[in-house]
Image (tube, coloured by chain):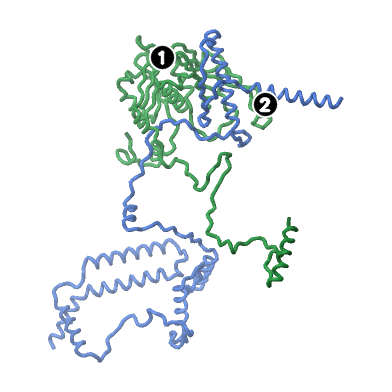
Amino acid sequence: MKQKEGVIKPKTKRAKRFLDNRAPKLTENVKNAMIMKGGNTSMTVTQALKDIYALKKPSAVLYKKKNITRPFEDSSSLEFFSKKTDSSLFLFGSHNKKRPNNLIFGRLFDFHVLDMIELGIEKYNSLSAIKNSKCPEGTKPMLVFAGEAFDHDDDHKRLKSLLTDFFRGPVVPSVRLAGLEHVLHFTALEGKIYMRSYSQNSLGFSRSLLKKSGCRTPRIELEEIGPSFDFVLRRTHLASDDLYKTAHRQPKALKPKKKKNISHDTFGTKFGRLHMQKQDLAKLQTRKMKGLRKRRGPAAAAEGETSSKTAKVEVE
Amino acid sequence: MAACSIEDLLAKAEQDEAEKLKSITVQKELDLEFDIGNLVAYDKNRIDIRQFREQKKEDFLRSLARDNTQLLVNEIWKHPTERVEEVIVVKLPEPTTPLPREKPPPKPRPPTKWEEFAKLKGIQKKKKTNLVWDDVAKNELHRLRNIARAQKIKVPGVGLTPTAQQSKTDLARAVNVAKSSTASAGKFQDRLPKEKAPRNTGKKRKFQPVIGNFSNEKQRQLDLLKVLDSKKPRLDVNKAVNKQMREDDREESAAKFKKGGKKGRKGGNFSGKGKGGGGKGKGRAGGKGQGPPSGKKGAGKPGKR
């Protein structure tokens, strides 16, 4: 609840910078995630939380202690934690008899819960179980969502948006081609969601780099590295439509300024309009052809005509 | 023979190209949707459940992932690339999927007191023109000051020292000063045909003629006596004390400045003005302080007569 003008006024420049970083901005920071455990957790859940923390480093915080709260009933402690660490994503893991190996993915807007989706882990392979070379921490992953359910079912659509938000990392203007290693693949099939994490270290990559062309698209070969989950969709708490809409409202300043007077036709040609004043067509500056000039006198006129005709022919 | 071999080579090259293309093309029923800004691909094709069950799960998922990733990478490669410090980098477009913000958009901060006042008064922000310090003029001024210090004379004040941009008033003042710097104080200097007489010249104090308006003089003397008689002090003690304090402060700072070392300010009229002003003020205050007692004495004398 630190407000810059209000409760706490910053006394040093460093404090002011810190508060400005957390204040609402036009282009926002990377979303931080807080990963926490519930009252009772199993080995699977703790290991799963650690693995997802590894995927989401450095923009994530992993809490070691257990928090005896139930997000679906009371979200006040979640909101408190999010204010403390300036996080807008959370992952809550718990385990009980009714809901074994439970993970709740959620996001907040303005430090209030926006969406929460509960996924149950049915099968899980941890990072350490899969013995392969891993890709470095902090690489921006490529995300792929496969399956019709992600398009037809509302819950799955929200889940798709939430997972994109969770795993996409910082928004960057350009990406190193060699750094496109990590792929997270989500498949929705028969009510279950399969999450797999692959690394692509194709040989074609290095060859194309050596050629410096960058145009020869390499052939992808995938190796499974990361944690693999088989999720089942349990409860959801989705935001109401108007809250969802408010959360999406972008400030006007971010809208790209439309340049006036530029239009494109179907072929992609750029058109612009020139606005001229009214011209006196009698006094237009055109090319002068001496032969076409008016001569004085009727005889001269006739001569002129004939000569003009000849002149025309010559021109042609 | 050569022709055949060339044809063969061409055919081989075509085959190679086709193979390469084959390796990166993927057949799908529906095209994938891409959001390259976020490096995301959405595959909406139906997944064959039977195939999924027949094959091993992992292999099926892996081949599906490979196909989708290939298509995504093909799409990324279509975007423009550039070379930044020995690294090839692809320029990503803006992300297209709408994702909710973290916090609401920032509210415009309330206008400050000055901004409100300016709006009320209709004051607009004026951009100051960039006045650049002219090195030539500065050198000239310093040179003259050094000469003055060396020869222990004063640097001429009023617009005679060169400055970069001299305004009309500066030049006029300089002309007037130059004109009046003659033996007869400029009385016999001719003016140019269209030159106007200088304003603000002449006597700074007007004295009444010695023998003139008798009634006026009488009135003035009686008024003076009335003032002297009144018990009210003509001196505003507060004002006088404040003025005195100010003069003291000024003298202190001038003394400190002098102590700090000669920094070329002696040449200017600065200190001269300060001293003169201080002296005048002191004299006045002193005179006023002694006013009533001396006045009373004076009042006594005419009364006796």
Q: Is residue B154 visible?
A: no
Q: Earlier in the sequence, mark 2 or mark 1?
A: 1
Location of the N terminus of chain B (image quadrant): top right
A9 or A273, nearer to the observer? A273
State the green chain. Answer: A
Mark 1 residue type: Gly
Q: Residue at point 62% right, 62% down?
A: A285
Q: In the image shown, does B11 or A237 lie closer to the viewer?
A: B11
- State the quadrant of the C terminus of chain B: bottom left
Give coordinates of residue A27: x percent, y percent: 44, 37
Image position, residue B29 (x, y; %): 56, 20
Q: Secondary structure at mark 2?
A: helix
How many numbered circles are shown?
Answer: 2
Q: In which quarter of the view is residue A247 placed?
A: top left
Q: The chain shown in blue is which?
A: B
Horizontal side of A35 relative to B41 (left or right) equals left
Chain holding disc 1: A
Label 2 crowding class (10 Å Cα cut-off): few <14, some 14-19, many 20+?
some
Q: Tell whether label 1 touches label 2 (CB within 8 Å).
A: no
Q: Which residue is mark 1?
A: A120
Outermost right residue: B1
Res. B275 visible in picture? yes
Amino acid type, mark 2: Arg
The mark found on residue B98 in the picture is none
| Left or right of B246 on screen, residue B263 | right
Q: x, y percentage for residue A13?
A: 40, 42
Q: Residues within 10 Å of mark 1 (few under 14, many from 20)?
A: many
B91 vs A151: above or below? below
- Rendered image: mark on residue A207: 2
Q: CA distance from mark 2 to mark 1?
A: 42 Å
Chain letter of the residue carrying label 2: A
User: Would residue B114 appear left or right of B127 to someone viewing this image?
Assistant: left
